[in-house]
Image: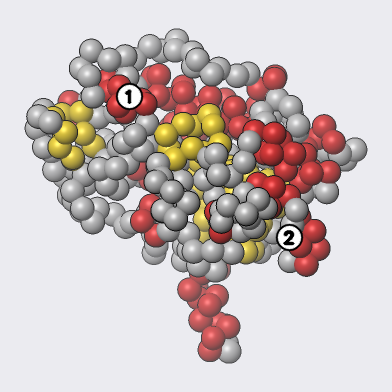
Amino acid sequence: MKRKLFFLVLISLTFFFFSCSAGDFELENVGLFEYTGDKNYRSQSHVEVSAAKNQYNDVNSENLSKDWYKDSSFYHIWVKAFVDSDGDRCGDLKGIEENLDYIQEILGCDAIWLSPIFSCSYVSIDGNMHGYDTINYYSINEFFGKPEDLESLITEVHKRGMKIIFDFVPNHTSDAHPWFLSSKEKNSDKRNWYLWSDEQLSWNNGMSSKTWHKKDSEYYYGAFNGMMPDLNFRNYEVREEMKNVVRYWLNKGFDGLRIDAVRYLIEEDGDYCDTQATHEWFQELRKEVIDAYESPKFMVCEAWIENDRNTLNEYFGTATNPEFNMVLDFDAGKPCIYSVRDGFDKTGGIFVSYEGIYICFWNFFRKS
């Protein structure tokens, strides 16, 4: 396969909190959490791929190539900090649409990656509206605009021959999400959508803080902090609900998605990240959702792994069981920066490590 460099332009600092390196430890009592839920579960917001609208192929005479992302330059937009079209001191979707000329013609980018746009926990515009603490996967942050604003943006992007992807955070929600609030009750139908324990377990010592958080007389698991409890992907209902979320937004016309914190989806005996069960769910998502669309979609993996190419490569899957179309390359950024700073090439080592990889496509980016 002919390798091409794929460059990502970042317009703002992406928060560092959502990724971290692994530590060595034994995962205790993982057997407490067996698979639960209805295998035939159907989301209340269920959608079918066949209902997709506003797709790229709907408005362009030349259909999108299934490998379109390999030749694309993405512009990452931190929506809140981009362009405020209505004077409320918060960037919004209309502001993006009004500046597509700038993105396409001045910057030379033909694709857009939006930071999280779903409803999230925030106090005010002046607060930390990062969006990785979702309270509703099926609604847009009210400060960013209305559903019709998103539809208009996607339509205009496609008319220009551009593409657009969204940021998806399936690992955890906000502790203010209705699912989590309901799960606190032991007889709730959402009880097993999160991980609850009568005792404080010592999972995930490799993280920077404790991961089991007390609520009354019980504890719940949140790999990053207590305000973002982890969803339980050992629950069949959660697994299907998250697939439906992806279908729901791809049906709106998005051309793909970037998935956050993929390493921590499902814990197994002795491990809290990069587990086989995690890979299997993403392979299901690829087969059942991503590859099911006539207008080609793709998904890019955010797995913060440095100096461990073999583990990172596993997120591509195999030729028979593909996983992610693209993986963010955290090893390439610094050598590229240092090459520019020092005036000579320091990237040789990272390209040697790509030899022999035949199904992958790396996403080089400057910094996060």
- Does residue 292 appear anywhere in the picture? yes
Up-down: is 96 above or below 290?
A: below
- Does residue 112 appear anywhere in the picture? no
Q: Position of residue 240 (x, y in %)?
A: 46, 22
Q: Nearer the viewer, residue 45 or 223?
A: 45
Query: What kind of residue is marked 2?
Result: Ile
Q: Nearer the viewer, residue 285 or 312?
A: 285
Q: Give the residue displayed 62% in from the left and 64% down from the top.
A: 9
Q: Position of residue 271 (x, y in %)?
A: 25, 43
Between the residue at mark 1 and the residue at mark 2, the CA separation in whole angstroms equals: 40 Å
Q: Residue at the far front: name it.
A: 87
Up-down: is 191 above or below 315?
A: above
The kind of secondary structure element at disc 1 is helix
Q: Give the residue displayed 36% in from the left and 56% down from the top.
A: 17
Tell whether 133 sits left or right of 336. left
Q: Give the residue displayed 36% in from the left and 38% down from the top.
A: 174
The kind of secondary structure element at disc 2 is helix
Report which residue position mark 1 lands on: 193
Q: Give the position of the N terminus as an image quadrant.
A: bottom right
Query: What kind of residue is marked 1?
Result: Trp
Q: Give the residue displayed 55% in from the left and 44% down from the top.
A: 143
Up-down: is 250 above or below 111?
A: above
Q: Position of residue 302 (x, y in %)?
A: 47, 50
Q: Position of residue 161 (x, y in %)?
A: 82, 47
Q: Which mark is residue 103?
A: 2
Q: Residue at the far right: name it.
A: 61
Crowd rating for badge 2 (residues with CA inside 10 Å; few <14, some 14–19, many 20+): some
